[in-house]
Image (spheres, grey):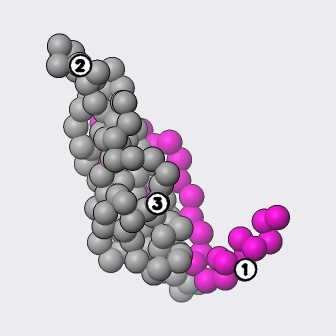
Amino acid sequence: QHARYIENKSFANFFDELEAGIGRETPHHRYLVRATPKAAFSYAIAKKESNNQKLPKYKSFVGATFVYNNSKGKSTTITIICKSDIPGSIQLPEPTLQNNVPTCPLGTSSLGHYSREIINEVKREDNYQ
């Protein structure tokens, strides 16, 4: 969603708009997205391997990309990825942005977060050769 916002100044409301290179489902997860003007949420929901299986053996994930103005007044994106603490086939609650710091919901653990100023982003990316 970060790259989509840099290029289009908007987040994707549909999974197909992301051009992620994977389908909406893989053998272990199904994928969903939801967007607002200032945030985008991506979900990887664990699937059961068979109808006989009571619970999935894989964990679910939720990612969020937020847009905010940093201390210099520059428009910035910040992204976080959260993993469920236990296996389960649920859509996890959304991360939040508190004082410009992304926070994972209860029952999940952060896999990390990063931020980038939007202005001059293309110029910086051009220097990554």
Question: Tag 3, which secondary structure?
Answer: loop
Q: What is the spatial separation of the Cα atoms under label 1 and label 3, in whole angstroms?
A: 23 Å
Q: Residue 50, which numbered label? A: 2
Above-or-below relation of 85 to 1 = above
Residue 41 position in % (x across, y down): 34, 58
Specify the farthest residue to the top.
52
**Magenta run includes residue 120:** yes
Q: Does the magenta stretch include residue 124?
A: yes
Front residue (pair 27, 89):
27
- Tags 3 and 2 in contact by the CB under 8 Å rule? no
On screen, residue 35 versus residue 65, left or right, reads left
Q: Which element is circle 1 on?
A: helix
Q: Could you tell me which quadrant the C terminus lies in?
A: bottom right
Q: Residues within 10 Å of mark 3 (few under 14, many from 20)?
A: few
What amino acid is at disc 2? Answer: Ser
Q: Label 3 belongs to which residue?
A: 19
The tag on residue 123 is 1
Q: In which quarter of the image is residue 92?
A: top left
Q: Residues within 10 Å of mark 2 (few under 14, many from 20)?
A: few
* Quadrant into which the N terminus falls: bottom left
96 to the left or right of 75:
left
Residue 107 pos. (x, y %): 30, 36
x and y percentages locating residue 34 in the rendered image: 28, 61
Report the front residue among 76 and 41.
41
Q: Which residue is at a point 24% across and 32% down the rendered structure image?
A: 89
Which residues, given as a range, are shown in magenta?
102-129
Which circle's residue, 2 or 1, is located before the other in the chain? 2
Pointer 1 or 3: first along the chain: 3
User: Which amino acid type is marked by label 1?
Assistant: Lys
C-alpha distance separating marks 3 and 2: 29 Å
- The crowding category of the residue bearing disc 1, from other C-alpha atoms within 10 Å (few below 14, some 14 to 19, many at least 20), is few
Q: Which residue is drawn at 57% across and 78% down?
A: 118
